[in-house]
Amino acid sequence: MTGSPREDGRDHVTEGRPDEIDACDRCLRRAFLVAHLAPRIAGLLDRPAPRVAGLLALPDDAFVAAATSGDSEDAWRFVESLDLEAARAALHAAGTLAVCRHAHDYPPPLRDLADPPAVLFAVGETGALRALRDDVAVAVVGTRRASPYGTEVAYALGRGLGAAGVAVVSGLARGIDGTAHRGCLDGGGVPVAVLACGPDVVYPRRHRGLYERVRADGVVVSELPPGTRPFRWSFPARNRIMAALARLTVVVEAAEPSGSLITADFARDIGRGVAAVPGRVTSSFARGTNGLLKDGAVPVTGTEDVLDELFGVGVRRAPPWREAPAGPADPQLSAVLEAAERFESVDAIARGLGLTAAAARAALGRLEAEGYLVRRDLGGWERAAS
Amino acid sequence: MLAAVATFALDGIRSHEVTVEVDVRSGVSIFTLVGLPDRAVRESRERVRAALMNSGLQFPKQRLTVNLAPAHVRKAGPGFDLAIAVGVLAASDQVPREQLEDCALCGELSLSGELRPVNGALAAALGARNAGYRRLLVPAANGPEAALVDGVEVYGLPTLARMADLLHGRWAPDLARPAVPDPDEADAGPDFADVRGQDDAKRALEIAAAGGHNLLMIGPPGAGKTMLARRLPGILPPPTFDEALEVTQVHSAAGIGHGRLATERPFRAPHHTISAQGLVGGGPTPRPGEITLAHRGVLFLDELPEFGRMAIDALRQPLEEGRVEIMRGQRALEFPANATVVAACNRCPCARPPDTCSCTSLELGRYLRRLSGPLLDRIDLVCNVEAVPAVELVDREGGRRTESATVRSRVVAARERQHTRLAGTGAFCNGDMDGRLTRRQVPLDAVLAARLLAVRGTANLSGRAHDRILRVARTIADLAGRHRVTVTDLDEALSYRLDGWEAIAA
């Protein structure tokens, strides 16, 4: 535990502690200091994205000075009053893991950051956190205001990557992030949720159920100590952790500007891959992702593309989710199936094939019953995904 | 001197008997009206006074007391005018009292002594008949409507003076002729032939009409959802005389009748800002709501998700029981409410075509959540209405033109099959069948059972959804004149179903 790099060794006393709490005094102090000053950072930064990284990279003295704009006495008093032993005991009691950047279990990819989190707090499956040392993870991120298309793709990617044994890193937010986690869980994979608040704080609250599932099957991490609420600046700060943890960041859907584009920027800055799912060029939902593609991001049209990018073309394959049904034997049914992919309405299908509406309906009903077609939310069918 | 006159006051859509007692005795000239009259009834004193004097009759300059019995029930409206005026005439010996014993009257007076029509003449006639009165005297304009009731002689009178003549035996008017329009002259209403294309929606409407199923149409604005729904009454079976009488009674009570028998089924399309009370009825003097006005006809709810939660929830009981019960004080009032519901909504909240749609999954989920609820449970069929492509409008020469009359004949035949099959079960059409009856009426052979099993493999089918599919399949078979439901019927029924929304909306 002691061979880790550090600037000086005076505060690093982790020997004899259980692995779960492997954080030196200095790092732990820094983590609590960041949480203590979080509201002041919030007030300090109007446009959080560009400056927050620089701020967090500062050494303690400069950080306190910058965050408090000179009025630093209160902050230092807070540091003096910190009882780290009690804090460690509380973390231990709550089952929260804490690894500082000098610890063995600290995910090495985070060290590529100019401002790595001093301590990574985590809840959930300990093994999942350790796995981040050596296993490949992919970040699947995107807008909170997702279109049905984005939702579908995010789910499929999460599920495919999960099934292929790739950890899916995301932010547990509404929209794409949460959907990717959900897909990963359904695919039997290991989700890694990076939060902008303490790892025990469920945000957004409507994702309570998802949070519990991620915690059970994967891990929830944060650089902020338990109990810290989210701040505006902590979301882009969280994004740098996602970008660092993942070897590839896939942006599924993003308007402009967008937090997901910040994640992509971070990923690029530290030499990680950036990929994006193409969208309609006329759609405002896809402006950000299509922009990334123009700038050279890897186009992703399915799980295969992500796996090819990570492991080389054709090296690793996701197991098929469900057996694709072969086409129906009846020629008229095949004709209707084909028409259903091309046309929106029953009338158009019937017209195209010269059928009555009733006959077209009967064929559609049968195709759906036999699993060739699935129904879309409010009208229309589409071919069942394989 | 004392006189009593029978009249009938509207209570909801029915009428109850009110006895107008008039006492005239010497004293200061004063006109007192008791028996819980509302403002309109109290003002009746002025109308009665002026009408009598303008008709060449005497208004007694004596102490005049009018009591409206039963005295504990509130009286509303101007319909008591005529009875009060005649009561005054009888009590002051200007008309023979014995003439009034077997006769009931109701009507509003103008100051000149003319008789003005009242709402609910049909209800009054039904009341008078059931109470055993031989004659009913009503304003001339109400005569044809009131005469629809058998078993009571209805006379339509133009003026108060004529009324006095009749009671004196100086004038013998003809009986009022019942207003049953000639079916050939009746307004046929909008026809299916006016709607180009939309074969899918037309087919769904035909099934809805044939089986008495409620329907949801989904499609972009301007696709013709309202236009299509308006044509449903025209393909439903023509109302029977009793049904027409019910419709006429409701509409007459609500003051939207035409003074004659309704020959077509009503079509009501309330705006989505309507209140729960407006939809199911109520108010201090309870009035029928839209669901009652649509009784035996069609209630069209355009933009279903925009309707208030309260309003839609209030529809639950009427849709299940075919009637509305309104509690007013200690009394329970019942309105009939047996209507086919056609609802319509857009595909998504922004209502733009799919390629320019800007709705997020979240917004879509919220929209779907607003759709679900008690009403959705009562909807058997869902169909899509597409924006008609431009070519469709010009090139229809070779196409089939389904006309409402043709469709209606198929619907009537299907209904007859249902009547025969459902005789004695309490249900009148497939849409009325509950879960148990449905399963008894649609026995599953091996092929049908296998298909339903296959659906369960791909979709999350609730028990209710299962029953809805079978009901619709039964109607499709009835339309085709088939004794048994075939797997093709079932396949078609499957395509109209609406299960699985709960998952999307969650």
Image (cartoon, grey):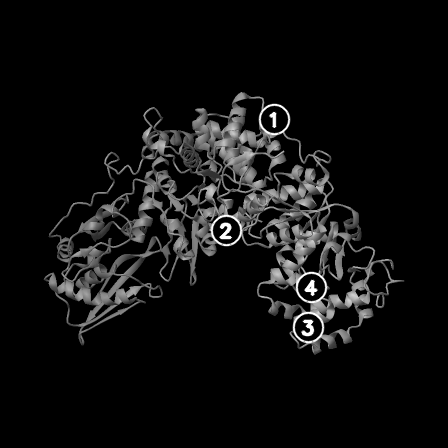
Camera-nearest residue between A357 and B245:
A357
Q: CA distance from mark 2 to mark 4?
A: 45 Å
Quadrant occupied by the C terminus of chain A: top right
Question: Which residue corresponds to mark 4?
Answer: A56
* Chain that bears disc 2: B
Q: Earlier in the sequence, mark 3 or mark 4?
A: 4
Q: Are marks 3 and 4 in contact (CB under 8 Å)?
A: no
Camera-nearest residue between A320 and B129:
A320
> How many numbered discs, if any?
4
Q: CA distance from mark 3 to mark 4?
A: 12 Å
Residue in the picture at 64% in, 55% down? A207
Residue A155: x %, y % from top left: 63, 44
* Residues packed near mark 4 inside 10 Å, few (<14), some (14 to 19) or many (20 plus): many
Q: CA distance from mark 3 to mark 1?
A: 80 Å
Task: Locate residue A270 relative to residue B331 in the image: left or right.
Answer: right
Question: Which residue corresponds to mark 2?
Answer: B370
Query: What residue type is disc 1 on?
Result: Ala
Question: Which residue corresponds to mark 1?
Answer: B446
Which is closer to the viewer, label 4 or label 1? Answer: 4
* Chain that bears disc 4: A
